[in-house]
Amino acid sequence: QVHLVESGGDLVQPGGSLRLSCAASGINFKLYTMKWYRQVPGKERELVATVTGGGITDYADSVKGRFTISRNNVYNRTYLQMNSLTPEDTAIYYCNTNAFGRNFWGRGTQVTVSS
């Protein structure tokens, strides 16, 4: 059974930083692309960042240069380092992978950027 658990969300001031973590189990982690999405109530879930099993990354234009996705294939974890946060980054952040023909999601972690 695939299980994803996010952590690290918090309240932070504009300009601040946070590091989100996603712990994965139930898959041969190093083989799978991992993604971070975010969602604001009333809006569609937005793809933020992607990292392949080999470490190739991609980002939404809105976070390029500010966010960094990474992974540790020994500890089965994916990270999202978020710098220069703005109120527009406020959302629930979800970890995602596609395995065995379907999408798996964690429960999300809340990030709030406010002074």
Image (cartoon, grey):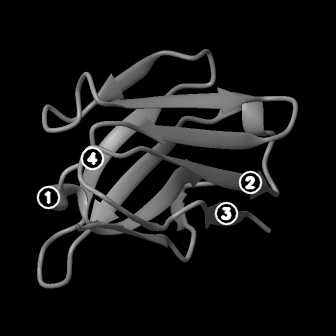
**Spatial CA span between label 1 and label 3:** 25 Å
**Spatial CA span between label 2 and label 1:** 27 Å
Q: Are marks 4 and 1 in contact (CB under 8 Å)?
A: no
Return the x and y of residue 11 as percentages of the image width and height: 41, 69
Query: In the drawing, what numbered circle is on residue 4?
Result: 3
Of marks 4 and 2, the one in the foreground:
4
Sequence-wise, the earlier of marks 2 and 1 is 2
Return the x and y of residue 109 as percentages of the image width and height: 50, 70
Return the x and y of residue 55 as percentages of the image width and height: 57, 17
**Spatial CA span between label 2 and label 3:** 5 Å
Residue found at x 28% / y 49%: 47
Q: Do the residues labelled 4 and 2 touch (CB within 8 Å)?
A: no
Q: Name the residue under label 4.
A: 85
Type of residue at label 4? Leu
Look at the numbered disc 4 and give the secondary structure of its residue.
loop
**Spatial CA span between label 4 and label 1:** 8 Å
Residue found at x 73% / y 63%: 2
Q: Do the residues labelled 2 and 3 touch (CB within 8 Å)?
A: yes
Q: Mark 1 points at which residue?
A: 88
Of residues 102 and 2, the one nearer the viewer is: 2
Type of residue at label 1? Glu
Number of callouts: 4
Q: Could you tell me which quadrant the N terminus lies in?
A: bottom right
Sequence-wise, the earlier of marks 2 and 3 is 3
Residue found at x 23% / y 67%: 115
Of residues 42 and 32, the one nearer the viewer is: 42
Return the x and y of residue 104 as percentages of the image width and height: 56, 64
Residue found at x 23% / y 53%: 14
Sequence-wise, the earlier of marks 4 and 3 is 3
**Spatial CA span between label 4 and label 2:** 26 Å
**Spatial CA span between label 4 and label 3:** 24 Å
